[in-house]
Amino acid sequence: MKSARAAIALLASIALTSACGLSNTASPPGKSESIKIGAVSSLSGSATFPDSTAAAQAVFDRVNAEGGIHGHKIEYIVADDKGDPGAAAQAARNLVTNKGVVGLSGSASLVDCAVNASFYAKSGISSIQGVGVDPTCFESPAISPVNAGPYLSTAENLYYASEVLKQNRVCLLLAIFGNTNDAYSKAIKSWSNLTGKKLLMEDRTIKPDSDPTPFVLRAKSKGCQAVLYNAVEPAAISMMKIVKQQNAQDMKWIMTSASYTEAVAKALGKSGDGLYANAEFEPFTQAHSPALTDWRKLLTKKKVPLTAFGESGYLAASHMVEALKSIKGPITRESVTKALKSLPPIASDMTGAPYKFGNAAKHGSNTAGKIVQLRDGEWHVASKGWMRYPGKIG
């Protein structure tokens, strides 16, 4: 963990140094020139997020088909960071320095923010992050994610377990990636201060490829009433299969948004009955939700998977289009950043709070979620409307 943090810090320093001497504006597009928008995403490696940039591409393609922005087509350039800090630093420098992108939208990566946030700020470029994972995504003046993120979602899940489900013996399993440890600690502390309650059991040693059996048995022996876990898709499936084998389904199992997928529902079927997850957007499995009509139609047409990550990319690109349309005059890196920072909050039925970039040192406008639950192999909305965490993190 320490060596990983040191590597990220070193690469961030290199990226920042390479920004020195760069102009804060890209060349304004000529009559036939495109508007270059970039993204740094994990498209290969241990954890991938391809749906975000695929959905963003679908939005930009539609805008181009309708004539573009003031006659200019959007050229979307996506770089794969492979979940590797070195590749992320290299990808960002190439997009900003060589490709001349004027803004970033729809990025979804484990490492992009931690490595490149300072570089983006120094370069005068702004990113509407599709999927913010690293804490730095929510602590940079240059980055504003459309999602709520795993830390707010964890606080929401804790609150839902103790205050809505009325479970007093709450336990927590955390898989720690990169520099996420402190951010999760802040979420737990916020919940504890808000409710006056403490975790019965907490374990941060679990990994996505861990055998879930000892963790399930420990939760049973401790008498946990609710167990929260920030599982990715395969880990959620493995965990719930062991939960059934060990007859631990009487406990409430609550996971973050990465577990809210059709693949999890299909793999578990009725054996996953009762599993809760946090949906950071309007739950995408609600086929008849009016909030999702345009999103569903567009992504289906473009053959992009209907997922929560697909929602994030769609929203990130849509908000970028709003900013681009508001620009009077040349579309440059400077004018795009100015437009984003001055753009009024954008309300959407797909989120429980308006999106805002703004001129702030930190960003985190998505402050609401909905809790979904598996029943008979299908996800159903369990919470009553949007759930807003009443506490403050950090």
Image: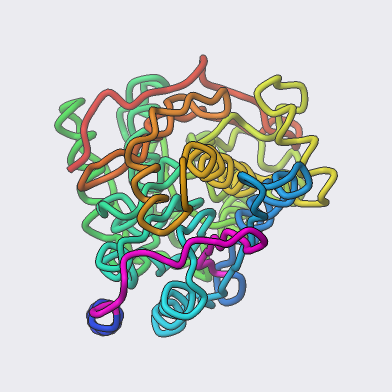
Name the residue at the front extreme: 31
Count of marks placed on residues: 0
Q: Residue at x 76, y 44 (%)?
A: 299
Image quadrant containing the C terminus: top left
**Colouring style:** rainbow
Is residue 3 found left or right of 154 in the rendered image? left
Place of residue 265 in the rendered image (x, y in percent of width and height, measured from the top left): 71, 44
Residue 251 shows up from this direction: yes
**Quarter of image, res 116:** bottom left
Does the magenta segment cover residue 373?
A: no
* Residue 365 picture quarter: top left
- Counting from the top left corner in percent of width and height, residue 135 is at 30, 56
Which residue: 48% across, 41% down?
323
Residue shown at 23%/42% (left/top)?
360
Percent of width and height locating residue 324: 51, 44
Front in this rendered view, residue 221 or 148: 148
In which quadrant is the N terminus drawn?
A: bottom left
Foreground of the two, 384 or 101: 101
Q: Can residue 247 be seen in this view?
A: no
100 w.r.t. 306: above or below = below
Residue toward you, 296 or 152: 296
Dividing the picture into quarters, in which one does residue 340 lie?
top left
Q: Does the magenta stretch include residue 26?
A: yes
Q: Is the magenta stretch mostly helix, strand or loop?
A: loop
* Percent x, y of residue 193: 14, 32
Q: Which residue range is magenta in the image?
A: 19-42
User: Is residue 14 shown above or below 185?
Assistant: below
Residue at the image point whose x is 51% and y is 29% from the top: 351
